[in-house]
Image: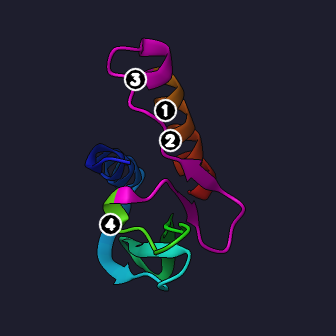
């Protein structure tokens, strides 16, 4: 994974009205880190995004995470290749990102 996945994901969530609150540590096993979001005017409605970090020998750091999921839901997102020189791959990433963000609110 690369930092652009994180940038794209955060920007997409913020366009849907979510405000980034904090980055929480992972569980030293399968979660690299967790992002916490809230909606303006709805302080009790929190969104937690867990980043996949499970690996053979260690928990991957956030910038090496290969996907994420919205806690408490079945919605997940795999961090595909960017497709810089492959427009269909870029479109697939954008489509999956948009579907994920729309599904979680």
Quarter occupied by the C terminus: bottom right
Asked whether 47 or 94 is in front, the reply is 94
Residue 89 image offset from top left, x and y in percent: 48, 22
Which of the two discs, 4 and 2, sits closer to the camera? 2
Magenta residues (range): 64-90
The CA span between labels 4 and 2 is 17 Å
Give the residue pinned by disc 4.
Answer: 19
Residue 103 image offset from top left, x and y in percent: 63, 51
The CA span between labels 1 and 3 is 8 Å
Question: Closer to the N terminus: mark 2 or mark 3?
Answer: 3
The CA span between labels 2 and 3 is 14 Å
Numbered label attached to residue 83: 3
Residue 94 image offset from top left, x and y in percent: 46, 31
Tags 1 and 3 in contact by the CB under 8 Å rule? Answer: yes
Q: Residue at left 41%, top 14%?
A: 86
Q: Is residue 30 left or right of residue 15?
A: right
Which of the two discs, 2 and 3, sits closer to the camera? 3
Q: Is residue 96 left or right of residue 18?
A: right
Residue 2 image offset from top left, x and y in percent: 31, 47
Question: Closer to the N terminus: mark 4 or mark 2?
Answer: 4
Give the residue pinned by disc 2.
Answer: 97
Residue 28 can be seen, yes or no: yes
Q: Quadrant of residue 22?
A: bottom left
Question: Does residue 81 belong to the magenta stretch?
Answer: yes
Question: Helix, strand or loop at disc 1?
Answer: helix
């Amino acid at each position: 994974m690369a930092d652009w996945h994180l940038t794209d994901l955060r920007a997409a969530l913020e366009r849907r009205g979510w405000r980034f609150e904090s980055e929480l540590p992972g569980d030293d096993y399968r979660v690299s880190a967790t992002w916490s979001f809230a909606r303006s005017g709805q302080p009790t409605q929190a969104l937690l995004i867990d980043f996949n970090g499970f690996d053979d020998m260690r928990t991957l750091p956030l910038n090496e995470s290969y996907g994420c999921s919205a806690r408490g839901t079945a919605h997940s997102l795999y961090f595909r290749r960017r497709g810089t020189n492959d427009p269909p791959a870029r479109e697939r990433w954008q489509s999956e990102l948009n579907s994920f963000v729309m599904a979680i609110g």
